[in-house]
Image (tube, rainbow, N blue to C red):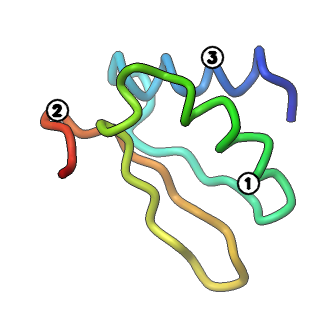
Amino acid sequence: MNEELVTEVLDKLMTGELSEYYIKNEDFMDFRMVLVKRKDFKHFRGIGQRGGDVLYQYLKEPRS
């Protein structure tokens, strides 16, 4: 998963164009490396799934 695609997905989550996005286990580290660099990092919630996959959502209020 390249950085441009990850940024596009994260921006779509932020604007509400996507309500959630499913990341496969093998793409998790690439996705996370881009995510943690964002200023709005705390607004993203990752919900772990069976097998190591993660479902990401954007929250209006940052998590603590």
**Mark 2 residue type:** Lys
- Please tell me in which quadrant of the rendered image residue 33 appears: top right
Residue drawn at x 49%, y 22% as measured from the top left: 38
Residue drawn at 45 percent across, 45 percent down? 20
**Amino acid, disc 3:** Glu
Q: Nearer the viewer, mark 1 or mark 3?
A: 1
- Give the class, few, some or many, for how many residues have Cα within 10 Å of label 2's Cα (few <14, many ≥20): few
Vertical position of residue 41 compared to residue 56: above or below = above
Residue corresponding to mark 1: 28
Residue 42's image quarter? Answer: top left
- The vertical placement of 22 against 16, above or below, is below
Front residue of 13 and 61: 61
Q: Position of residue 26 (x, y in %)?
A: 86, 60
N-terminal label among 1 and 3 = 3
Helix, strand or loop status at disc 1: helix
Q: Residue at x 57, y 34 (%)?
A: 35
Q: Which residue is mark 3?
A: 8
Q: Which residue is mark 2?
A: 60
